[in-house]
Every structure is written in C-alpha cells, then in structure tokens.
Amino acid sequence: MTKLTTRPFERNLRMARLGFGTGAKIAAHSFSNLFRDAGGRADADRVFYAREAQVMADELGQLKGSIMKAGQMLSLYGQYFLPPEAVDVLSSLQDDTPAVAWPVVAPVLERGLGKQRLAELEVDERPLAAASLGQAHRARRRSDGAELVLKIQYPGVGDAIESDVNTLSRVIGMTRLAPRGLDLNSIFAEVREMLHREVDYVAERRFTEDFAERLADDERYVVPRIYREFCSDQVLATSFEPGEGARAKAVQSLPQSVRNELALNFLDLFLIEFFDWGMVQTDPHFGNYRIRQEAGHPRIVLLDFGATRIFGRGFVDGYRSIVAGALARDAARVIDGARAIGLMDDAFPQNVVSAFVDLCELIMEPFREPHDAGDGQQWFNAQGAYRWAESDLLKRVTTRASRNALSRYFRVPPREIVFLHRRLAGAFIMAATLGAEVSARERLLARL
C-alpha cells in the first residue's frame, strides 16, 4: 500500500457511499423476503448479511487506521446485537494486514526522534509486521549492535479517531445491521475510548515497563526492554525478542509435556494479571505472543501492551465470587457476584437468572474434576486432564446463551466484561491451539 487515506472528508465519503449502498440493498432484500417462507428468509438473511459485512470489512481494511480498528472492536460488542454473519466477518479484521510503503511512515519516525537521534540507528525499511494503527520495523543501534523493534504509528491516526468512530456509527445505523431501538451511543463511546488508549504510546511504554518489572523474576515470560531514547508519542522502541507463533510447525511439534506446560503458563498469566494485579492485557491476538525454547524450557514472549486495562478491586472481588460460586455450584454466590459488578439486577426473571448460573458453571468445565463435569466428562483423558483441542466448549457456551435468551438480557454487558472475556476466550483458544491435555484447576483454586 503506497498511501493512506487520512483526510476525514475522504474517509467519510467512502464510508457514506458504503452506508447508502448497503441501505438500499437491505431495502431490496427486505422486500424480497416478503415472498419467502420462514426457512427461505433465514437462509437468505445468512447469505445477505455475510456478503454485506464482507463488503464493509473490505472497505475498513483498505482505509486502515482507527476506523479499521473500530471495526475489530465493534465485533466484540456486536456479538450481543449484530447478525452472527456480520460478527464473523468483522472478527476477521485482524491486525496482520498489508503494510504501507516506507515513505508513508518514515516522516513520522524522523519527526518523533529527530535526525540526530535517528542517525544512531540502522532501520530496515521492510516492515516486520503491520497492523491497523501502525507497523513495526527492525533496527540496529550502531554503537553496540543492539537489535530493536520500532513500532511506528500511521500518520493522522490519532487525529481521525473522533471522525472515524462517528462515521462508523452512522454507517451501522444506515445499514440497519443493528436492532431498531438499540442505543449505540454508549457502545461507540467505549470503542472511542479504547482507540484513544491504543494510540497512546506513552501509556503503552509505561505498561510495558510495568509488566517487565512485575515479571522480572518469572522465567516463564519475557517482556521486551524499552529504549526510551528512541521513543516518542508516535514511536515505541523495544528490544527485538525472537520467537515462533503458536501455530508454527516448530511449536506444534514440541513434545506433549512442553505444550501442556505452555498452555498452563498462558492460563496462569491471565489469572495473575486479573486476580493478583487487576491489570490485564486484553488483546489475545496470537501476534502478541511468541514462544521460544531456552535451555530446554519454553518461554512466552509478551508483545504489545496497548490494550491493557485496569480493573478495580471491587470488580475483581465480585468476579471472583462468580467464578468461585460457579466452580462450587453455589448459585447464591454466583448471583451475589453478578449483582456486585452490575451484570444482573433484581428485575431479571428467575428463569434467566438460573440460565445465567448454568452458563457460568459450564464455563468452569475445564477446571473441574472429571466426576464433577457432567456431560463434559468426555473431554477428560484417562489421567483426568482436560483435552482442550477436542472440546467444543466455546461453541456450547455460545449456543446455550443464545438458546436461553441471555443475549437479550445481557445485550451490552459492562465494558469490563467484554474485554475480560475476550482475553479469557483467547487463553482457552491458545490452550486448544497447543493441543494441551492438562488440568488448570489448582492454578485457579490458588486465586479464589
């Protein structure tokens, strides 16, 4: 990609055209549905929404910047109110996107560091990785050969956030993908706040240093070192930390015992971050993690702390009650915890409350003893370890929530829940990707 569309007018015009076009097609689609039976309407809806969401995703991907990242974040909330087909497509807006040409980002680097400081580095103009808000380049410090990674923000990204979020909100309304009567203002306010967090490289630098200090004595994890002298508000400089992705052949071919250890360490990190620190890196994208072997022991390299969130002690304690209650099958404790964090109130019907408790107990399946897992016993091996890759737990959770109309009562849960569960689901998916067969029960019990 040789250039970015950064001017608000140009970006708004492209999205407005998309909105008007999709709105017209929805009107035609709705008219055609008048002549279809129930089964035909359902099939036609699935095809139509998948196609239109893909058109939207393609346009967002071309625009890059905050509007693309906003589309990713919208998929998190969208699971509660958008058609499943639209959520699936928006979720595909991952950060491993085509990079922009060096002349686009080079001026950002020069302005941020100054010519004299920049001259201390040899920068590889070929990008190491690219995302929606910026891209990374390797560099070498001339004085001592230290290898660095420079994360460079795309020009104009921060300034476009307000305009981009407002535009995407209007497009969602014009396309009528969201249910009528749903107030999208609070949802897009959350998306706007998170985008401002992700372009705040000064805060990300502090979080990176905080994680590094907290994990300094834990040999299981590696956090890159910050080079402050090469940082600015739009450039983040860290040490280059080699490693392989979880799906790489070198990782997938590791012995079962090593992959089990890695899965436990991924799960343990989440538990430490949330229950011990109240500070969670909430983006589980696989590109944020690398795995490398050192002296026969696997280490997890942690990258990108821009999505770090702080959770208040009251929220952590309330959530702990939900988890402990679900694990012990203590419905009263689950309900008390849900009310404490604002997830439930006295107006909820009893059948919805019961369904919520059942759902929480289901999520605890990997942390149970096999004899207490109910229908989930089949996912434990002969040694009592949970077979993460074989289990269809996340699918069963989604199906049960939908079947019991929980999505109607929890249409837009508290923002803490949305981002926390994104990371929790990511930890589960990582364990499945590693093909782990392991019980994490004791790790969880240690924090309840």
Image (tube, helix red, strand yellow):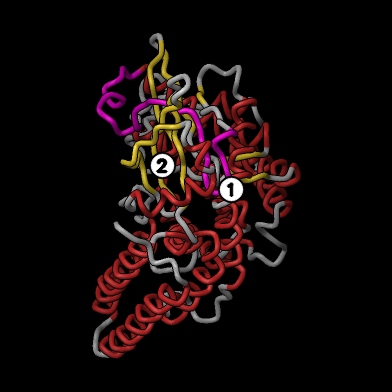
> Which element carries disc 1, helix, strand or loop?
loop
Q: Residue at x 58, y 29 (%)?
A: 444
The correct choice, above or below, for 343 with respect to 145 in the image is: below
Q: Residue at x 48, y 38 (%)?
A: 118
Is residue 238 a member of the stretch shown in magenta? Answer: yes
- Tell me the quadrant of the picture where the N terminus can be found: bottom left
Rendered location of residue 226, percent (x, y): 56, 31
Q: CA distance from mark 2 to mark 1?
A: 15 Å
Q: Residues within 10 Å of mark 2 (few under 14, many from 20)?
A: many
Q: Residues within 10 Å of mark 1 (few under 14, many from 20)?
A: some
Callout 2, which amino acid?
A: Ala
Is residue 413 a member of the stretch shown in magenta? Answer: no
Dot label at residue 233: 1
Find disc 2 in the rendering and name its residue.
136
Q: Residue at x 64, y 32 (%)?
A: 210
Lateral position of residue 305 relative to residue 124, left or right = right
The correct choice, above or below, for 279 with respect to 160 in the image is: above
